[in-house]
Amino acid sequence: MTGRAARRPLPGPDPLRTDLHTHTDFSSDGHDSLGAVVAAATDSGLRTLVLTDHVRVDTTYLPGYVEAVRAARATAPLELVCGVEAKILDTEGRIDLPADLTGIEHVALADHRFPLPDGPAHPDAVRALLDGGRLAPDEALRLLVLATARAVERVPEGLTAHVAHLFSVLPKTGLDEGGVDAALLEPLARACRERDAAVELNEKWRCPSVRTARLLHRAGVRLGAGSDAHRARAVGRFPWVAGALADATAEERRTP
């Protein structure tokens, strides 16, 4: 997509005043209306609410969604960003997005499935590959980071983006973040720096780990907060994220 004006990067200077990851009942996973979500964000003291309802290549609700967000801006006391959440499909970084993204401003990139060279794999299938010795754990981690980095690079021109719940798929496959180090993360860190894309600390899934977040922060990647709220009452509520962000950036705060 071309012709879009570039938007400022998200989140702002105070990441806890932006919720990067929220859902309404426009997609089947959200339980509450757009109005209820905006009201909850206001009550939480947010300055920016990023709406990220789930999409796939065949999603058809976007025109109505975009119009509803535009209408809500007329009275909302905070900034509303019209975004979507889409899964990473494969190690080329293809994203499960509709062709027409008119009015969409932001993309949350998600590991809802494990992106392998031949497409998205269910975690159980990846676990079977690992258990059968057909996929090595370190190679699996490398492929996941590579796919995520390439997805960041593939975000359509003019849209802001962030990585949602990084590594949430790992526990489902029997893998963990213990094998993740700075060298492995560098392709993702480089892509995020070049596209000015943040990595979300996700309240719902409590990922990535503080250790991974610290490595990304040291590599110059901006960190943000995402509630991944599927109900309005969870919007802008970050008890775990607040502590994780503080721990991940503590070294910077101690520097004179």
Image (tube, helix red, strand yellow):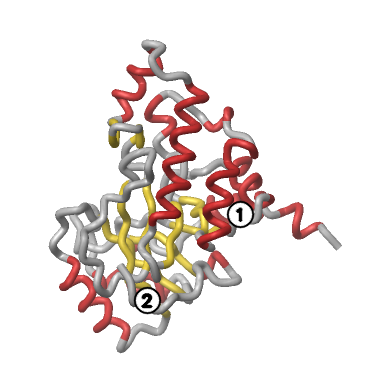
Identify residue type, mark 1: Leu
48 shown above or below 22: below
Looking at the image, tell me whether mark 1 or mark 2 is earlier in sequence order: 2
Q: Which residue is mark 1?
A: 245
Left or right for 245, reference 43: right
187 shown above or below 160: above
Q: Nearer the viewer, residue 256 or 104?
A: 104
The location of residue 66, given as percent across then percent down, is 23, 74
Outermost residue, front direction? 2
Q: For the residue labelled by badge 2, is the local secondary structure a helix, a strand or a loop? A: strand
The location of residue 108, given as percent across then percent down, is 38, 57
Name the residue at 30% across, 88% down: 74
Q: Nearer the viewer, residue 106 or 46?
A: 106
Tell me the number on the disc at residue 80: 2
Identify residue type, mark 2: Leu
Q: How many marks?
A: 2
Can I make out residue 194 in this image?
A: yes
Q: For the residue labelled by badge 1, is the local secondary structure a helix, a strand or a loop? A: helix
